[in-house]
Amino acid sequence: MEIQQTHRKMNRPLVSLVLAGALVSAIPQESHAAFFTTVIIPAIVGGIATGTAVGTVSGLLGWGLKQAEEANKTPDKPEKVWRIQAGRGFNEFPNKEYDLYRSLLSSKIDGGWDWGNAARHYWVKGGQQNKLEVDMKDAVGTYKLSGLRNYTGGDLDVNMQKATLRLGQFNGNSFTSFKDSADRTTRVDFNAKNISIDNFLEINNRVGSGAGRKASSTVLTLQASEGITSDKNAEISLYDGATLNLASNSVKLMGNVWMGRLQYVGAYLAPSYSTINTSKVTGEVNFNHLTVGDRNAAQAGIIASNKTHIGTLDLWQSAGLNIIAPPEGGYKDKPNNTTSQSGTKNDKQQSSNSNTEVINPPNNTQKTEIQPTQVIDGSFAGGKDTVVNIDRINTKADGTIKVGGFKASLTTNAAHLNIGKGGVNLSNQASGRTLLVENLTGNITVDGPLRVNNQVGGYALAGSSANFEFKAGVDTKNGTATFNNDISLGRFVNLKVDAHTANFKGIDTGNGGFNTLDFSGVTNKVNINKLITASTNVAVKNFNINELIVKTNGVSVGEYTHFSEDIGSQSRINTVRLETGTRSIFSGGVKFKSGEKLVINEFYYSPWNYFDARNIKNVEITRKFASSTPENPWGTSKLMFNNLTLGQNAVMDYSQFSNLTIQGDFINNQGTINYLVRGGKVATLNVGNAAAMMFNNDIDSATGFYKPLIKINSAQDLIKNTEHVLLKAKIIGYGNVSTGTNGISNVNLEEQFKERLALYNNNNRMDTCVVRNTDDIKACGMAIGNQSMVNNPDNYKYLIGKAWKNIGISKTANGSKISVYYLGNSTPTENGGNTTNLPTNTTNNARSANYALVKNAPFAHRATPNLVAINQHDFGTIESVFELANRSKDIDTLYTHSGAQGRDLLQTLLIDSHDAGYARQMIDNTSTGEITKQLNAATDALNNVASLEHKQSGLQTLSLS
């Protein structure tokens, strides 16, 4: 449908009863997002830009109400229609410039002084109730209209579609109306090839001082087949009741476009509603500078094309802008269902000027054709290619104080709302200011910073908070809000984001704190690369935070970062860093309201900072749990959990400075706890309920040890003749995940666990030494503090090929505690015992064994069974052999029932295929009776196989006695 070209095409929207009910209940300054679900989008055909009723805050609902009201006015019927037709002389000179007013308009436009407003104004000859039509459709050249100020009606229609129109070369133009009993709307239409605006242009301004008659409403339609432009100094002002229709291939307005300007001084409390309709622009619409509000609560709307670009958007503190993008496929115009009245016979009179015709239509027969309006019931999203790009958003404010502050708003339904590198600036004053950026059905992307009073990290005064609000996909619940620049918020500056998914590069609220990050409206996931907090309230559920840094402001106790919402079951923090506090009152920290689970990869704590996760059901540390200042532990941290899990291969450093509280259960799931000796002691890890020590049979290939669950570093500094309790709980269970066995009071598992409890002097194991060469003798000497072994290793060559156990260290692992008792290091002697010969081992990287000589070891038995290995095969690890030997009772039982051949067969088959550790597992997992049964059957079968002798002849026996 084309933009209005004659008086016979006017637009009248159809308002549904559902919408009428919503309009009646409308309350200014209140958010009614549901109002958008009943949308009136007319195919704006010339006339009032009836607008789209969109629910949001700050009176945009009122904007919809006002536009619907204007749209349903009975179209004004002119009493007279004056027609001017350009003669052939205007068709001949395409390079010539004309003064449009002097050449064609002046004969049918009168002017005079308006005493009430103390200003001159212009009107159609005979009065504002008449209309002037100018037919110059074949004219060429350039036509200037300059200085037609305060044109108050009636309707003006200029058709110059082959010519160029320049508005305001030396002076500006203003098109307005007078509000009287007829309450007429002035409609001015220009249809040209190109239109350029070179000076100010005002729409529906008050004449002069504005003290006299008010303006009613004015619609200015600019239609250009090629393009519409404005100069950078050409300001376009839309006052209350103004509508600007733009139709062209492209629109580029370099000057400021000001919507909602004050009509007169002191009109700050008067409502203001204005509209720009660009739905008929096929290309991009470019506003270099768009201003909404003039120290008033202006409400403005843009009925947009597919692509809208705004360089700088200035919003007054209580103003609202609504940008409505077209649905997929664009607006569909309904066919004309009204019979044309163009057949009316009119009396004609020829004037003395051959190119002017005056028509005086009878008043009682003049009719106006009404074009139907498309009504869309239900919420609709902008088409998938609809985009609104804004380089920078800026709000302006004054010192007015209002309870609850002021809120400015930007609302759209485009598929993508992009805010560029200029970012957002919020001007804050007393009582607080808020900016709402809302995409009802699409995404929001912000590439620039957030500023307060033009400062990144700018702050607000207490009681006058500055608030940023972003809402993506309000209606669809499927929008994404993305912030590609670091966000720095000063004191009392808050950020609220509602979306399906929210992505942040970085957020810093550590510049004094007292901020709120409200992401409770994010329904799927919040992703933050780096979050820095101090006294910050964080409302978020199901988040991914790459790095959380918690600062302390050093003011007073209780000023902490508070995760004030249930964090759900899908929350994860890659790295937590608690910065060092300033004093012992714990002037900062982190506290969680509730949650099912939190996974932390790395956790670094510091003195005088705390982490309170007792209201989270389960917390898991997957990689590292340590002090950030281990070299300078001058203060105490406070770390509190409900149930804590140390994940597989995770490392936890623990000392008295950790001050760790576990009120529920503790699971060490194949991780390592490093106990740090301070003052000759280790801190006891107290578990409120149950503890589980879960280990595996993984081997450290560099050392040959099982990977320990507990390591005591600097164990040589432990106070002697004292039991050092490492862990206490109501119940302690042990489990080997490699074999799938676990239990409480299981002596076998407890012994296996003790093999994974290691004491170190620097990097040397001191509870067990394995000696393969003189270097191992030196290392053993450094571990146990025997300088003679370090200086004279040759004196201890008798240890080469043996494992030696330091009997000055004893270990306890039972159902209630884990501890070590340190008597002091024993000294190896040539015939002093506590050694065992090492088996043949082709893997020479095994340095020491973590299980050496134990009480009642197999070699202490008088009738010791031989441990058989295949020549040139690898035992795997030395400790695996020791563990297999420690099951000697089971092997003895097999020997009793199956004889040497069955026993040797078991060991041969298992060790040949795997290693001694696997043999031990098989014995643990299978009852000796079952093994006996299977071995007897296997032995009978193999006795008949000739290769059996060959297998036995290849065996090499190693005696452990």
Image: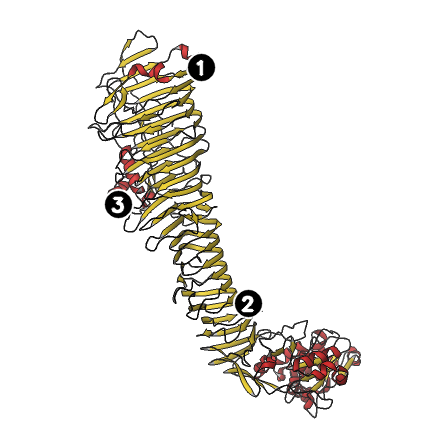
Task: Give the residue at mark 1.
Answer: 96
Q: In the figure, 515 relative to 673: above or below?
A: above
Give the SS element for disc 1.
loop
Asked if marks 1 and 3 touch (Cβ < 8 Å), the reply is: no
- At label 3, counting other C-alpha atoms closer than 10 Å, the crowd grade (few under 14, some 14-19, many 20 or more) is some
- For the C terminus, the image quarter is bottom right
Task: Give the residue at mark 2.
Answer: 624
Q: Position of residue 494 (x, y in %)?
A: 39, 54
Q: In the figure, 959 relative to 165: above or below?
A: below
Q: Position of residue 624 (x, y in %)?
A: 55, 67
Instruction: Point out the frontmost of discs 1 and 3.
Output: 1
Of the image marks 2 and 3, the number of the one nearer the N terminus: 3
Quarter holding residue 423: top left
Note whether residue 325 is visible: yes
Instruction: Point out the frontmost of discs 1 and 2.
Output: 1
How far, Cα to Cα, is label 2 from label 3? 55 Å
Asked if marks 2 and 3 touch (Cβ < 8 Å), the reply is: no
Q: Amino acid at mark 2?
A: Lys
Q: Amino acid at mark 3?
A: Ile
How far, Cα to Cα, is label 1 from label 2? 81 Å
Q: Position of residue 499 (x, y in %)?
A: 42, 51
Which residue is the extreme one toward the bottom? 862
Q: Amino acid at mark 1?
A: Lys
Query: Nearest the camera: 794 or 544?
Result: 794
Q: In the displayed structure, does residue 889 sit left or right of residue 689?
A: right
Q: Residue at x 58, y 86 (%)?
A: 720
Q: In the displayed structure, does residue 183 sit left or right of residue 673?
A: left
Which residue is the extreme one toward the top? 352
Task: Give the residue at mark 3.
Answer: 27
